[in-house]
C-alpha cells in the first residue's frame, strides 16, 4: 500500500552474494513508507471523480478484458541462475502463476510477456534498493512503454533483505520513468527464498502496481486500505492463524489475503472489493494515461560496429559542449542522469553515451584523467 511498496526481509543479512538456502525463521515483511492521509484522500477523490463521469456500462466494458504488456529486465552479474541469469522457464512459470491468480478471481486483467531484456550489470543486480541511485539509473535507462506497460526489474539485494518493491498508479504522472516493480530473483518460482518462492510474491507486488494497499494500511484506523471488504488489521500477519488485532472494528484479520504478509500458503485471495479497486485505479490512472516514456529512453540495440554519427569523437571528449547536431544523444544522457548534463562529465557518463548511442569512444581525457569507454551491443546489454 503506499506511495512505493517494499517487500522486505526483516531480520539478518543474506549469506555471501545472497544465495544461501538457509533463511531466517523471522517473517518476511514490507518496508514501504505509508502515504499521508492527504495523499490517500486526494487519490480517492480523483477515483471517485473518474467513476462519476463513467456510466456503469462503460466501466464494465472497459474492465472486462484488460491485457497488460509486461517487459522483464533481468539484471545479472554472471551467467548462473544464482548470479541472476534466470532461466526462461522460471520467468514463464511466474507469468503463468500471475495470470492464473487473476483469472481465478475474475479481475479482468491478463498479462502478456512482451519482452525479456537481459542486462549484465553487477551494480544494478546487487544494489537496486528503493530510492537509491542505482535503481534510479537502472529504470531511467531500461524502462519502456506508457502507464499501461508493466516493467519488472529482477535483481538481488546484497546488503538488505528485500523481496521487492513497487510504485503505485497515482505516482506515474509525477515520474513516469520510476514506474514499475523491482523484484528479488529469490522470490521467483524455484528461487532461493524457499519460504517465498511459489510465485505469489509477484502477485502481491503487481497488486500494488494496480493500486492495492496492504490490508494493514493505517492499522485499526480509518480509512484502512480503502477497501470495504478487507477488515481492519493492526499489524502484518506472520502466519495463517486466525486473529482479531482490531477488536473494536468488525471482522477477523484478513490473514489469507494476498496483500498481507502471511506465509505463502496464506496468500490465497483477492476480495471483490480489491478487484473493484484495481479496476477503478486502472481507469483513473493507467487506461487513458498513454503518455509514453520519451523515445530517447527506449533501450537501444544499436550495433557499436555501426558507423557512428559524425560528432562521436566530440561527444566522447567534450560531453555536453557539442555541436547542435549531437544534441539528440546529449539530451538522452542528460535525461538519464542530470549530473551528466551539468558538466560533471566523467567515465560514468561517457560509458552511458557509448551504451545508449552505439558509439565506440576512443581513449579520451576528461578532468585530467585518461579513460576508455566501449559501447555495448544489447541482446544482453552491459551497464
Image: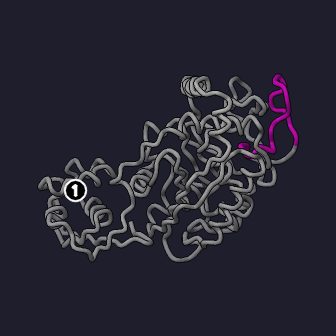
Apparent side of residue 306 relative to residue 112 in the rendered image (left or right): left
Q: Position of residue 83 (x, y in %)?
A: 54, 71
Q: Position of residue 78 (x, y in %)?
A: 50, 75
Q: Residue at x 43, y 41 (%)?
A: 175
Q: Residue at x 26, y 74 (%)?
A: 306
Question: In the depicted view, which residue is nearer to us: 279 or 367?
Answer: 279
Q: Is residue 262 above or below residue 42?
A: below
Is residue 243 a member of the stretch shown in magenta?
Answer: yes
Residue position for label 1: 345
Quarter of the picture containing the N terminus is top right
- Does the magenta stretch mainly form a helix, a strand or a loop? loop
Q: Quadrant of residue 379?
A: bottom left
Is residue 50 a member of the stretch shown in magenta?
Answer: no
Count up the numbered dots. Answer: 1
Apparent side of residue 253 relative to residue 187 in the rendered image (left or right): right
Q: Position of residue 236 (x, y in %)?
A: 73, 40
Quarter of the picture containing the C terminus is bottom left
Find the magenta span and give its range.
242-261
Q: Position of residue 118 (x, y in %)?
A: 48, 68
Q: Residue at x 50, y 69 (%)?
A: 76
Apparent side of residue 173 relative to residue 88 in the rendered image (left or right): left
Classify mark 1: helix, strand or loop.
loop
Question: In the depicted view, which residue is nearer to us: 31 or 119?
Answer: 119
Q: Residue at x 56, y 40 (%)?
A: 168
Amino acid at each position: 500500500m503506499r506511495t512505493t511498496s517494499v517487500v522486505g526481509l526483516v531480520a539478518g543479512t543474506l549469506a555471501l552474494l545472497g544465495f544461501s538456502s538457509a533463511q531466517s525463521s523471522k517473517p518476511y515483511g514490507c518496508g514501504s513508507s505509508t502515504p499521508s492521509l492527504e495523499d490517500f484522500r486526494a487519490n480517492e477523490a480523483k477515483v471517485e471523480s473518474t467513476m462519476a463521469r463513467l456510466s456503469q456500462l462503460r466501466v464494465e466494458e472497459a474492465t472486462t478484458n484488460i491485457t497488460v504488456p509486461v517487459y522483464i529486465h533481468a539484471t545479472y552479474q554472471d551467467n548462473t541462475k544464482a548470479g541472476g541469469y534466470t532461466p526462461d522457464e522460471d520467468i514463464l512459470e511466474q507469468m503463468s502463476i500471475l495470470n492464473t491468480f487473476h483469472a481465478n478471481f475474475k479481475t479482468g486483467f491478463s498479462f502478456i510477456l512482451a519482452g525479456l531484456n537481459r542486462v549484465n550489470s553487477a551494480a544494478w543486480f546487487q544494489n537496486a534498493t528503493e530510492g537509491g541511485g542505482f535503481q534510479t539509473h537502472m529504470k531511467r535507462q531500461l524502462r519502456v512503454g506508457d502507464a499501461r506497460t508493466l516493467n519488472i526489474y529482477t535483481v538481488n539485494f546484497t546488503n538488505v533483505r528485500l523481496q521487492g518493491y513497487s510504485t503505485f498508479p497515482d505516482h506515474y504522472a509525477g515520474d513516469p520513468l520510476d514506474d514499475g516493480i523491482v523484484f528479488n530473483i529469490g522470490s521467483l518460482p524455484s528461487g532461493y527464498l524457499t519460504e517465498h518462492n511459489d510465485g505469489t510474491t509477484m502477485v502481491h507486488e503487481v497488486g500494488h502496481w494496480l493500486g492495492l494497499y496492504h490490508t494493514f494500511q493505517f492499522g485499526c484506523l480509518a480509512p484502512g486500505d480503502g477497501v470495504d471488504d478487507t477488515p481492519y488489521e493492526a499489524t502484518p500477519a506472520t502466519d495463517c492463524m486466525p486473529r482479531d488485532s482490531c477488536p473494536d472494528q468488525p471482522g477477523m484479520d484478513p490473514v489469507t489475503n494476498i496483500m498481507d504478509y502471511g506465509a505463502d500458503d496464506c496468500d490465497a485471495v483477492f476480495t471483490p472489493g480489491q478487484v473493484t479497486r484495481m479496476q477503478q485505479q486502472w481507469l483513473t490512472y493507467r487506461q487513458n494515461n498513454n503518455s509514453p516514456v520519451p523515445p530517447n529512453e527506449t533501450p537501444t540495440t544499436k550495433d557499436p560496429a555501426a558507423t557512428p554519427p559524425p560528432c562521436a569523437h566530440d561527444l566522447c571528449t567534450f560531453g555536453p559542449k557539442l555541436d547542435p547536431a549531437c544534441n539528440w544523444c546529449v539530451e538522452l544522457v542528460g535525461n538519464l542522469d542530470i549530473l551528466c548534463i551539468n558538466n560533471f562529465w566523467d567515465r560514468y557518463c561517457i560509458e552511458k553515451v557509448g551504451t545508449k548511442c552505439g558509439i565506440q569512444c576512443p581513449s579520451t581525457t576528461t578532468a585530467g584523467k585518461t579513460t576508455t569507454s566501449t559501447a555495448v551491443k544489447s541482446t544482453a546489454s552491459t551497464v
